[in-house]
């Protein structure tokens, strides 16, 4: 019995290592070939390239950071402004399977209701100075998705109907400090698969070693 359990553990670990290695090789090939889709995904201020553990599959979560000169008072009723907002620029997720673009799992939006929000103050020159630890992107998810960037992690959720007309939800979270991800799928509100793995951090076409 112990030998069987040990064999299953070793086999599962080996498959996970093989899948992540194949996924990373697939990504490296596309980067080396200057693939236009991957190049476009990596041009953003922040791009997390995440490698799935059991298949030749990876996805890229990307977004642009706010413009320091574009902050506006969030609430007109505040006598002294402490919360600031600005429109969020392009963000999304793009998945690749076996070296090919997966159009069904591509989301790139500049949603009109998505905003960056941060706490801060105006200095003597009336310029907004924000607290970096409070910076976050908020989206209402009104179109079946949500995308949020918080102090600790980036998370997104998408809802859609599959070919069998089941209600499917996919959730992805990337921990910024460790560059690890977790994701899961639900079908008709029942969780069917969980997954964890590692990511690389890229910024404007170059890999970065530290956290955002």
Image: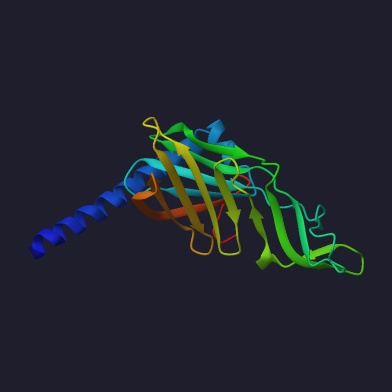
Please name whichever residue, 9 or 154, is drawn nearer the observer in this view of the structure. Answer: 154
Residue ID at (40%, 33%):
165
Q: Quadrant of the N terminus?
A: bottom left
Which quadrant would the C terminus be assigned to in this image?
A: bottom right
Q: Where residue 127 sits in the image (x, y, percent)? A: 87, 62
Q: Is residue 31 above or below residue 122?
A: above
Colouring style:
rainbow
| Above/below status of 176 relative to 24 | below
Task: Residue lying at the far right in this picture: please name it.
Answer: 125
The percent coordinates of residue 55 (x first, y second) are 33, 42
Q: Quadrant of residue 72?
A: bottom right
Looking at the rendered structure, the number of numbered marks drawn on it comes to: 0
Q: Relative to the observer, which residue lies in front, 89 or 205?
A: 89
Taking 63 as reference, is 201 left or right? left
Residue 179 % position (x, y): 49, 59
- Residue at 66%, 48% (x, y): give it: 64
**Residue 18, percent from left and from top:** 30, 47
Q: Residue furthest left?
A: 1
User: Seen in the image, is 124 located left or right of residue 162?
Assistant: right
Name the one closer to the observer, 47 or 185. 185
């Amino acid at each position: 019995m112990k030998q069987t359990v040990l064999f299953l553990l070793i086999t599962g670990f080996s498959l996970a290592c093989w899948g992540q290695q194949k996924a990373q090789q697939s990504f490296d090939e596309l980067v080396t070939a200057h693939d236009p889709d991957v190049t476009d995904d990596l041009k953003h201020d922040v791009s997390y390239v995440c490698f799935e553990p059991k298949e030749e599959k990876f996805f890229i979560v990307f977004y642009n950071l706010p413009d320091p000169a574009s902050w506006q008072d969030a609430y007109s009723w505040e006598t002294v402004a402490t919360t600031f907002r600005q429109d969020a620029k392009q963000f999304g997720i793009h998945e690749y399977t076996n070296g090919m673009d997966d159009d069904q799992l591509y989301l790139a939006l500049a949603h009109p209701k998505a905003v960056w929000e941060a706490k801060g103050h105006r200095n003597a020159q009336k310029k907004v100075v924000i607290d970096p630890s409070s910076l976050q992107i908020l989206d209402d998810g009104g179109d079946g998705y949500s995308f949020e960037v918080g102090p600790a992690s980036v998370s997104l959720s998408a809802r859609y109907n599959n070919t069998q007309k089941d209600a499917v939800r996919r959730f992805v979270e990337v921990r910024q400090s460790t560059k690890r991800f977790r994701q899961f799928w639900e079908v008709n509100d029942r969780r069917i698969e969980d997954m964890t793995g590692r990511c690389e951090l890229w910024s404007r076409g170059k890999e970065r070693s530290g956290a955002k």
